[in-house]
Image (cartoon, rainbow, N blue to C red):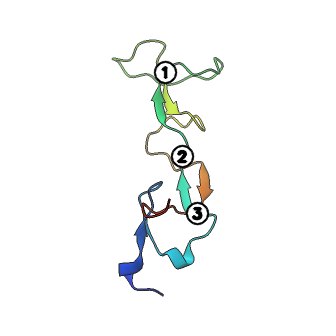
Amino acid sequence: MEKKESWKICKRCKETYDPSSNTSSSCRFHPSFFVCRRHDDQKRYYELGPNDPPYAAKFYDCCGAEDPEASGCTTNFHVSYDDD
């Protein structure tokens, strides 16, 4: 195992990782933003806060998860801030 000095921080999930053990399932993240707006699917219901307008919904645009701390819906390789 490499020394921790060579480890990197993933810009997707913010985890520290060892580049030598980076695989296509190492990083779990949401490829889209957490948004607050009406969802295109009118069949879904969202829990609104007391100060939210009646049309507002808060969710990840990629998967519809309503919890901002929800585990990512996509896996891929970690991407370092050093990578271009």
Q: In front here: 68 or 10?
A: 10
Question: In front of the other: label 3 or label 1?
Answer: 3
Label 1, label 2: how far apart the Cα atoms are: 17 Å
Label 2, label 3: how far apart the Cα atoms are: 13 Å
Seen in the picture, residue 30 relative to 16 is either above or below; the reply is: above
Labels 2 & 3 near each other (Cβ < 8 A): no
**Which residue in the structure is indicated by mark 3?**
77
Q: Position of residue 66 (x, y in %)?
A: 50, 34
Three-letter amino acid code at disc 1? Arg
Badge 3 density bin: few <14, some 14–19, many ≥20, Cα 10 Å: some
Identify the element where label 2 is drawn: loop
Q: Residue furthest top?
A: 54
Q: In front here: 14 or 53?
A: 14
Q: Earlier in the sequence, mark 1 or mark 2?
A: 2
Q: Position of residue 12 (x, y in %)?
A: 48, 54
Labels 3 & 1 near each other (Cβ < 8 A): no
Three-letter amino acid code at disc 3? Phe
**Which residue in the structure is indicated by mark 1?**
37
Badge 2 density bin: few <14, some 14–19, many ≥20, Cα 10 Å: some
**Which residue in the structure is indicated by mark 2?**
30
Q: Quadrant of residue 36?
A: top left
Question: In front of the other: label 2 or label 3?
Answer: 3
Three-letter amino acid code at disc 2? His
**Count of numbered circles on the image:** 3
